[in-house]
Image (spheres, rainbow, N blue to C red):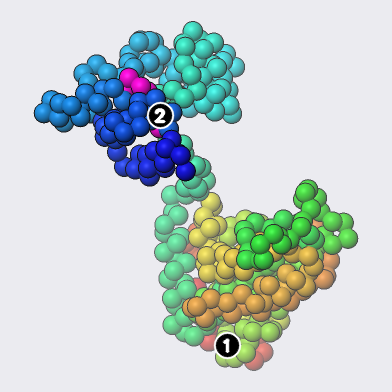
Amino acid sequence: MNNEEAIRYRYLAVRDHMDERRRRIFAAAEARVYGIVTVSRATGIARSTIGRGLKDLKSPELLTGVVRRKGAGRRCRSDEDPTLIEDFRALVEPATMGDPMRPLLWVSKSWAKLSTALKAMGHDVSASTIPKLLDKIGYRRQVNRKTREGGNHPDRDAQFEHINAQVLRFQDHGEPAVSVDTKKKELIGDFKNAGSDYRPEGCADQVRVHDFKDKNLGKAVPHGIYDISANEGWVTVGVDHDTAEFAVNSLRCWWQRMGQARYPQGSSLLITVDGGGSNGSTVRLWKRELQAFADETELAVTVCHYPPGTSKWNKIEHKMFCFITQNWRGKPLTSRMAVVELIGSTTTTKGLTIRCELDTRLYEKAIKVTETEMNGLNIERHEFHPEWNYTIRPRLITNQPKEALIDA
């Protein structure tokens, strides 16, 4: 290692821990031994700066707490150009996004393009100056933040309280209360799945570049039922359309495979569910299929829909679906059975268990439910928001008295 390399090694080791004055004094001390030219080449510090450092070493009593001399350093560009800040603010102001007369569109806010746009407006500004200008007007890089939930219904909080009261009452009576929803549809095949997983270095799964549905494999439609009291889940993986028939059939499978065994004396069922989709509050087929389910099981089915724009508050979203997503992150869903197995293997430290089955049935879309069929439903609407809260009772009860049912 020659002298220049040794100086550079020592300088780089301490450079980030020193201010400007300490750097020039360090360089001056090295220059006393190796010379100004050698030290300047090794550190990149100007010879004039090293010369000032030698003066500081020669007269240390003249050193003060001020790092730079008064007036040292280049003046701020905004001080030299009085209209720069206002023109720059107008350039990046969010309120003017989309103005066709602006020289720069909102999609092009890189430092280089902001600099180019300012130069076109008559300002001599380099790209390296842009972050200083952004800091001066109080701008920082921001990510999108999910906070808006759509329309805020005036009775939103009251509906949440109503749902909570219903759940507590059913739990007090030992009756099942479930959260129901359809998870995001998933492409089947060697497609990229969000997230990452541990694998040997350099052995990442190879997946397709484009996410076009494979006509032979299709999509998976996971529909879930989460038992709020038992912390147990059921997922039916469909291969066709997400219809009300499919949703209620998933509920039927849960009752036959899990619910009936856990609640052998159950006479009522509470379903908390979103206000839209295949189980929406205005979907006639949803109510007709629930009536058929109630007739088969002799359960009084109470349904409480979440208010508009609040689907993410549904219990199943953050008690079950999020853990399924974590369980298969970074794994291509290469087959329907892979989806079933990954869902069925999902567990948590709080004791969540999930059973999963494949439903290969085909479900017809756009089924019309007539007014006559609707009038034949044994549906009792609650006093509070009857469009969101209602109970569908069995039309034929043979094994249990009606008094055993929980009144809405």
Left or right of 206, for residue 305: left
Where residue 248 appears, as percent x and y from the top left, is 70, 70
What percent of the width, then of the height, locates residue 375? 69, 64
Seen from the viewer's position, the closer of residues 175 and 25 is 25
Mark 2 vs 1, N-terminal side: 2
| Residue at point 58%, 57% (across, down) | 275
* Residue 139 point in image, percent of width and height: 41, 31
Q: How many marks?
A: 2
In the image, taking residue 53 as reference, residue 8 lies left or right, namely right
For the question of whether residue 304 can be seen, the reply is no
At 52% across and 65% down in the image, what residue appears? 318
Q: Which mark is residue 161?
A: none
Which class describes the residues within 10 Å of circle 1: few (<14), some (14-19), or many (20+)? some
Which residue is labeled 1 in the image? Answer: 263
Q: Which residues are magenta?
A: 43-49
- Alpha carbon distance from label 2 to label 1: 86 Å
Q: Is residue 33 visible?
A: yes
Name the element at disc 2.
helix
Task: Estimate the x, y position of residue 201 in percent, counting from the top left.
Answer: 66, 62
- Front residue of 152/374: it is 152
Residue furthest to the left: 61
Q: Quadrant of residue 29?
A: top left
Left or right, 383 with reference to 39: right
Which mark, residue 38? Answer: 2
**Is 264 included in the stretch rendered in magenta?**
no
Residue count near mark 2 (Cα–Cα under 10 Å), binned few <14, some 14–19, many ≥20: some
Element carrying mark 1 = loop
To which quarter of the image does residue 70 belong?
top left
Amino acid of disc 1: Tyr
Question: Is 216 situated left or right of 345 in this image?
Answer: right
Q: Identify the image quadrant of residue 244.
A: bottom right
Q: Residue at x 54, y 10 (%)?
A: 120
